[in-house]
């Protein structure tokens, strides 16, 4: 598993927490930051997934059993 996937998932979870706390206390700025963090996390996770797919394809090409 790629490092970006792990970091992306963590950023996404942190964003969900931030958004929830922002809603709870009525802080729209914190809520918006949480939503932004979630998008960043999803993008980073997608990049990591693509890197994993490329690496797996390269491994299959190098060892075609």
Image (tube, helix red, strand yellow):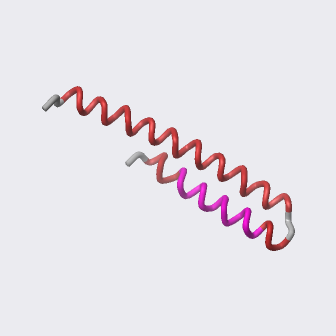
Number of numbered discs overlaid on the protein picture: 0
Q: Name the image quarter holding the C terminus.
A: top left
Q: Percent from the top left, x then y, of residue 49?
A: 45, 41
Extreme residue toward the left, this view: 65
- Say if 26 sits above or below 50 in the image: below
Q: Would residue 62 appear left or right of 37 to someone viewing this image?
A: left
Determine if the magenta segment contains residue 20: yes
Residue at 23%, 32% in the rendered image: 60
Residue at 52%, 46% in the rendered image: 45
Extreme residue toward the front, this view: 65
Q: Percent from the top left, x then y, of residue 24?
A: 79, 73
- Say if 53 sits above or below 6 in the image: above
Residue at 53%, 55% in the rendered image: 9
| Residue 31 occupies quadrant | bottom right
Extreme residue toward the top, this view: 61
- Say if 34 sits above or below 43 in the image: below
Residue stretch in magenta: 8-21
Predominant SS of the magenta segment = helix
Q: Would residue 53 appear left or right of 46 to someone viewing this image?
A: left
Residue at 72%, 57% in the rendered image: 34
- Say if 3 sits above or below 34 in the image: above
Q: Percent from the top left, x then y, of residue 28?
A: 85, 60
Q: Would residue 15 appear left or right of 57 to someone viewing this image?
A: right
Q: Would residue 1 appear left or right of 26 to someone viewing this image?
A: left
Q: Percent from the top left, x then y, of residue 27?
A: 85, 65
């Amino acid at each position: 598993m790629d490092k970006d996937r792990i970091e992306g998932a963590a950023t996404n979870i942190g964003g969900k927490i931030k958004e929830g706390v922002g809603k709870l206390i009525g802080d729209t700025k914190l809520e918006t930051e949480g939503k932004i963090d979630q998008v960043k996390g999803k993008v980073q996770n997608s990049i990591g997934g693509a890197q994993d797919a490329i690496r797996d394809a390269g491994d299959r090409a190098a060892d075609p059993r």
